[in-house]
Image (cartoon, rainbow, N blue to C red):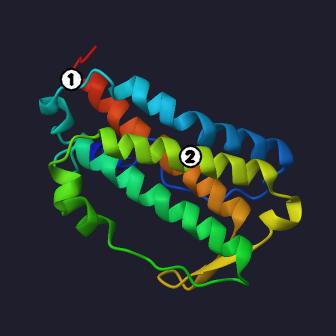
Amino acid sequence: MDNLEQKRFPIGRFEIPENICDIKLNEYIKVIKDFPDKLKNLIEDFSDDQLDTQYREGGWTVRQLINHIADSHMNSLIRLKLALTEDNPTIKPYDEAKFAELQDSVNMPIKPAMRIIKGTHQRWTVLLKAMTNKQFERTFHHPEHNESYDLRVYLANYVWHCNHHFAHIENLKKEKNWS
């Protein structure tokens, strides 16, 4: 993996796990539950200059990453609820890069996004913990990929998403020697 690829995908690209057992589901739910505090601990002492630093050349700033996580995880919670209440619903994709260029992602303090992440993850965790194995078999259709995904794979993907963006920020912090 070259340096740009390593910076873009510090934990590698998402790969669909072959088998997601109950033990793995519980591990995934714990990641979703713990992520807001873990993220807060990583960035709580960041200055505005640090928040406005790109995690890689041509990449988003930390501020944009935090707002992207809020946007993405709000959408994820809605997709979960749609899959739990409708039969294989077609989800609405959105242009993440264009979202990240909007003023609420570029210029605002991160506190509102962090509150969104915390509340979204609290609600998400309650739903995930209450789900049955049968409910984890429910699906939604992603029109951009023209594929349906079950909620086990969906959850694995969002655990990867948490860890992926956390690694972007953590690696930048190490690279810049920000204590």
At a point 65% along the width and 56% down the height, the residue shown is 155
At a point 84% along the width and 50% down the height, the residue shown is 21
Residue 171 seen in render: yes
Label 2 close to label 1 by CB (< 8 Å):
no
Quadrant housing residue 16: bottom right
At a point 42% along the width and 23% down the height, the residue shown is 41
Which type of secondary structure does the marked residue at label 1 adopt? Answer: loop
Check residue 176 in the rendering and tell me which mark sits there, or answer none: 1
The residues tagged by marks 2 and 1 sit, at their Cα atoms, a distance apart of: 29 Å
Give the left or right position of residue 108, taking residue 33 as reference. Answer: left
**Three-letter code, disc 2:** His
**Image quadrant occupied by the C terminus:** top left
Write down the residue under mark 2.
121
Q: Position of residue 53 (x, y in %)?
A: 16, 37
Q: Is residue 105 above or below residue 142?
A: above
Callout 2: few (<14), some (14-19), or many (20+) C-alpha neighbours within 10 Å?
Answer: many
